Amino acid sequence: MVACYPGNGTGYVRHVDNPNGDGRCITCIYYLNKNWDAKVCRDPAFTLTVTSLVRRRVFPYSFLLFGFDLFVQVNGGLLQIFPEGRNVVANIEPLFDRLLIFWSDRRNPHEVKQAFATR
């Protein structure tokens, strides 16, 4: 499957690609987005600077306001894999020219955090 997603805060909740054993064995993801930044900035000084640039349309970043704390979402879209039977989370940034291959069944539940740009 080849897909392109619109951003706008979309993501995927924790799931398994092949929960019913329909024959698919592996999931492959190949990232094609150049200059993608999955980070979220929480530094108030940086946030205020970026916010003023966003308002003047100098930066194409999205920003969200939660109470009095401003969070700047750059691109988002971090992939998190929760390997079955382990107390670890693999945080995988969607870097250009990165290929991921993992089992599609219950061994690798995963989710994609919100993305704020087309991917």
Image: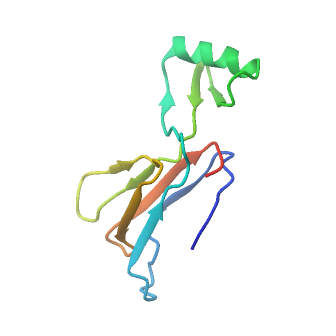
In depth, the one of 37 and 11 nearer the eye is 37
Picture residue at 47% right of the left edge, 72% below the top: 17
Instruction: Decide if residue 27 is on the left or right side of residue 56.
Output: left
Colour setting:
rainbow
Instruction: Decide if residue 91 is on the left or right side of residue 117.
Output: left
Task: Tell me where residue 87 appears, x and y as whole percent.
Answer: 24, 53
Q: How many marks?
A: 0
- Any part of residue 15 in sight: no
Picture residue at 52% right of the left edge, 58% below the top: 13
Task: Tell me where residue 25 appears, x and y as whole percent.
Answer: 38, 81
Picture residue at 64% right of the left edge, 44% below the top: 117
Residue lying furthest bottom in this view?
23
Q: Quadrant of the N terminus?
A: bottom right
Task: Tell me where residue 2 appears, x and y as whole percent.
Answer: 59, 69
Residue lying furthest left in this view?
86
Is residue 89 depicted above or below 22 in this figure? Answer: above
Picture residue at 54% right of the left edge, 54% below the top: 32
- Any part of residue 117 in sight: yes
Task: Tell me where residue 94 appears, x and y as whole percent.
Answer: 47, 49
In depth, the one of 67 and 53 nearer the eye is 53
Residue lying furthest right in this view?
56
